[in-house]
Image (tube, grey):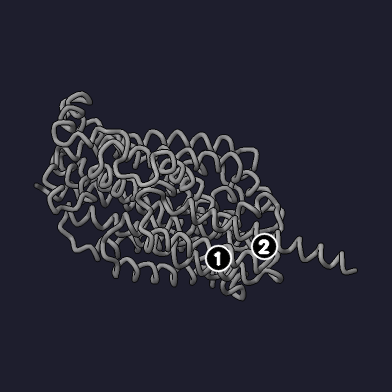
Amino acid sequence: MNKLPIALSFIAFLLLFIGVGIYSASRKKNTTADYLLASRNVNPWLTGLSAFATAHSGGMFISTIGWTYQVGISSVWLLVGWFLGDYLAWFFIHKPLRIVSEETSSETIGAFLAQKPQENRSIAAVSALITIAFLGAYAAAQLLAGSKALHVIFGWNYDWGIILGASIVVTYCFSGGIRASIWTDALQSVLMMVAMIMLLVIAVAACGGLGGLWQQLGAMDPTLIDPIPHNLQYGFGLFLLSWLIAGVGVVGQPHIMVRAMVLDSAENIGITRNIYALSYVIFSTAAVIVGLTSRVLLPELINGGDSELALPQMAIELLPALLIGVILAGIFSAVISTADSQILSCSAALTQDLFPGMAHSYKLVKVGTLIVTAIILAIALASNKNMFALGVFAWSALASGLGPILMLRVWRFPVSASEGVTMMLVGIATAAMWNGVLKLSGSIYEVLPGMLAGFLVYAIARLLNSQVVKSKRDFD
């Protein structure tokens, strides 16, 4: 295989991303509010495409296809549940977040959770530590996803792909902040869609059409075409509910929720939501079908191979060199569009919430971006190369830790510093125990018990507080 056309088409797209990101800097203002929120003036189309590219990333290209390869059509329920929960959040959370965050002059998710920084300093600090730890791990998973594709196609060591991805992200994020992230995300979302649909059409044709694909899957293993997952300890209903709550867990993802805060008007949430939803449905459906075709076309991966490498390997099998470069650029688009947002969110957490002395210095905020990128790069280089496990638990930890308190803030419920910190810590601890100790995540994804634990802490605290107030009144 001639790798020169692959490299040339891939490099051309990378240069395009960098160019768009750097050009966006011509619209910037040298303020922290512009660096972190693009002055709350992004149009709904760019916001919707950016939110889609940020939320559905290397995980869709690498992990979803790899998981579908292993379990078959039943993987679709993860995406269905996730979509329904995510869509509900767009209806009930995103618009009030845009409104309340502007009312409270909150420039970061941590500041929004704290509301009154002087009284709730601990909420901002703990949420910042959670964001840097888990969102940093999540960003590392994205860089790892991109490096897997480069490893398959060029034979590169994983580390070189990770370093390349981090270098590209920091180049345009450092110059243009979140505006650069959003502009490049919108471009990358289009390339992601084109790459996935192109491979879908070619792969289905190679399997003899959808009918031929279905027949071959059934002949290989009947469980691959069984829509109901097997070995669910608590039944299908709770399994699907847990993935719906996982979708609601988007409210704990700072890199996605900040997209609602940058929108030019709360009244445009509906347009943004519909662009996001349509993109998600098309892209995720294509990813599942591509995953199924990879099981037929690359059956050897089931015996000790890495199913997360299915997509790039299938591209090599089916496509001419120039189009392989397009697929590789599509994978990298997905990776970078999420990693850049996560790095900026971690940078904001570091410089605005954890060390507020840096908050009003535009130069120090940019330095924070470099520091965070270095931390994430170190995590990615030290990882065990399992992207799915790394990304999925990071999502659940953020959802369980930050999601419940953000929902309470959006709905204007009072949350004291002690209540907020306890909610975050108990939520993450519950998710970790459910996943790592009880080993129940295969039947019920840990976001459900994690978020419930956070709300339970709040309910108990409010009940105890009301009883204390009542006792004081009775005493008086």
Report the amino acid beneath label 2: Ala
Q: Closer to the camera, 262 or 399? A: 399
Q: Is residue 300 visible?
A: yes
Report the amino acid beneath label 1: Ser
Residue drawn at point x = 53 percent, y = 64 percent: 426
Q: Position of residue 250 (x, y in %)?
A: 50, 49
Q: Quadrant of residue 115?
A: bottom right
Q: Earlier in the sequence, mark 2 or mark 1?
A: 1
Residue drawn at point x = 34 percent, y = 37 percent: 76
User: What residue is disc 2 on?
Assistant: 461
Residue drawn at point x = 44 percent, y = 63 percent: 134
User: What residue is disc 1 on?
Assistant: 127
Q: Position of residue 409 (x, y in %)?
A: 66, 55
Decide: is 19 above or below 352.
above
- Residue reaching furthest to the left: 1
Q: Within 10 angstroms of label 1, few (less than 14), some, or many (20 or more) residues?
A: many
Calculate the distance from the C-alpha at mark 2 to the C-alpha at mark 1: 19 Å
Residue drawn at point x = 59 percent, y = 39 percent: 91
Q: Closer to the camera, 137 or 81? A: 81
Label 2 secondary element? helix
Is 198 left or right of 461, judged from the image as shown?
Answer: left
